[in-house]
Image (cartoon, grey):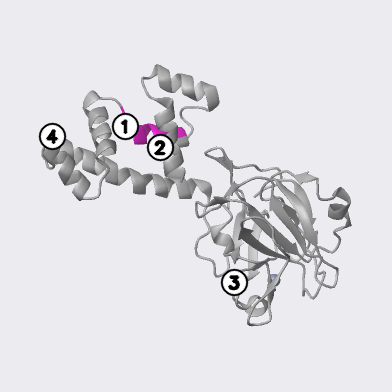
């Protein structure tokens, strides 16, 4: 992410990778991260890059300089993870040389998404400026668990590429992580995946492949499809209007504006704003 960047998807703030340049020098289950999910990010060069709040968050705990000045934050509300989960997030950052500025603001201060709060550094036993990042789903419980390899880690941490969207981040080295993605890439793949099934089946119904009346209903139900949803699509197609899922994709692409403006435009065009929103939420799921 870039400084000041915000991302909200379907009304839920989405986690952003907390640095402008991704240059991962050590990932999950490697070296000092044995048996756990963690990454070391060295930023654009050997110097010290700032770290930004991946979501609105509050300080909940911190550790000594010798322990790397670890700082722990929890999101102020449930946030969207890159894997689609909506939950609280706990974020741990280590190696900032000075955290007195963070501690001075205290536990009630809300760091807004995109706000600069930390830096790369070498506090603790770091060799070379970097930031060690761990992230977990759920609310804060305690600072560390120790695993079978003797590695202290954030409890319940998950792979960072399933947590952060990479919008605004320049990827220099993505490390061994396979699932980094921007919000646009994620919603596009979800949209095509979910749309295809309903659309294809509805087209088949219109082509007569599923019979009619109660025969059609029982065939579709037996095959595991939602008869009512398919029938609704069929009716929409036959009426010449766009389907709810087509409109939902357009909404996600920003073609229908936001808030009350969107609602008014959808109504005027003959669509049910609540049904469209429901489909948008389902796609972004
Ligand atoms: Zn590390």
Question: Where, by quadrant of the figure, is residue 121 drawn?
Answer: bottom right
Where on the image, by quarter, is ligand 1? bottom right
Mark 2 and mark 4 lie on one chain; the one further toward the N terminus is 4
Q: Which residue is mark 4?
A: 213
**Callout 3 crowding tier (Cα within 10 Å): few <14, some 14–19, many ≥20:** many
Which labelled disc corresponds to residue 279? Answer: 2
Callout 4 secondary element: helix
275 displayed left or right of 226: right
Q: Which residue is mark 1?
A: 243
Alpha-carbon distance for marks 3 and 1?
Answer: 43 Å
**Callout 1 crowding tier (Cα within 10 Å): few <14, some 14–19, many ≥20:** many
Alpha-carbon distance for marks 2 and 3?
Answer: 35 Å
Alpha-carbon distance for marks 1 and 2?
Answer: 11 Å
Residue numbers of the magenta segment:
242-251
Tell which tag, 2 or 4, sits nearer the viewer. 4
Mark 3 and mark 4 lie on one chain; the one further toward the N terminus is 3
Question: Where, by quadrant of the figure, is residue 69 drawn?
Answer: bottom right
Alpha-carbon distance for marks 2 and 4?
Answer: 26 Å
Alpha-carbon distance for marks 1 and 4?
Answer: 21 Å
Mark 3 and mark 1 lie on one chain; the one further toward the N terminus is 3
- Judge by depth and name the residue closer to the eye, 32 or 278: 278
Q: Position of residue 147 (x, y in %)?
A: 64, 78
Q: Which residue is mark 3?
A: 28
Callout 3 secondary element: loop
Residue 65 magenta: no
Rendered view: 238 above or below 197: above
């Amino acid at each position: 992410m870039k400084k000041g960047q915000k991302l909200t998807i379907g009304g839920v703030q989405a986690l952003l990778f907390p640095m402008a340049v991704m240059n991962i020098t050590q990932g999950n289950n490697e070296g000092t991260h044995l048996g756990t999910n963690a990454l070391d990010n060295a930023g654009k060069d050997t110097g010290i890059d700032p770290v930004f709040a991946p979501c609105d968050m509050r300080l909940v705990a911190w550790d000594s300089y010798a322990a790397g000045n670890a700082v722990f934050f929890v999101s102020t509300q449930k946030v969207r993870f890159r894997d689609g989960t909506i939950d609280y997030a706990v974020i741990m950052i280590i190696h900032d040389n000075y955290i007195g500025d963070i501690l001075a603001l205290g536990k009630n201060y809300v760091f807004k998404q995109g706000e600069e709060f930390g830096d790369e550094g070498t506090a603790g036993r770091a060799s070379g400026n970097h930031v060690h990042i761990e992230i977990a789903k759920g609310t804060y419980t305690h600072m560390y668990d120790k695993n079978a390899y003797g590695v202290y880690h954030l409890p319940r941490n998950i792979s960072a590429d399933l947590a952060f969207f990479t919008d605004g981040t320049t990827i220099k080295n993505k490390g061994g992580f396979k699932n980094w993605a921007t919000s646009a890439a994620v919603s596009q793949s979800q949209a095509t995946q979910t749309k295809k099934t309903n659309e294809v089946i509805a087209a088949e119904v219109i082509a007569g492949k599923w019979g009619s009346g109660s025969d059609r209903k029982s065939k579709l139900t037996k095959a595991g499809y939602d008869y009512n949803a398919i029938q609704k699509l069929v009716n929409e197609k036959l009426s010449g209007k766009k389907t709810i899922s087509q409109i939902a994709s357009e909404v996600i692409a920003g073609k229908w504006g936001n808030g009350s403006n969107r609602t008014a435009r959808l109504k005027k065009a003959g669509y049910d704003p609540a049904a469209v929103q429901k489909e948008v939420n389902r796609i972004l799921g």
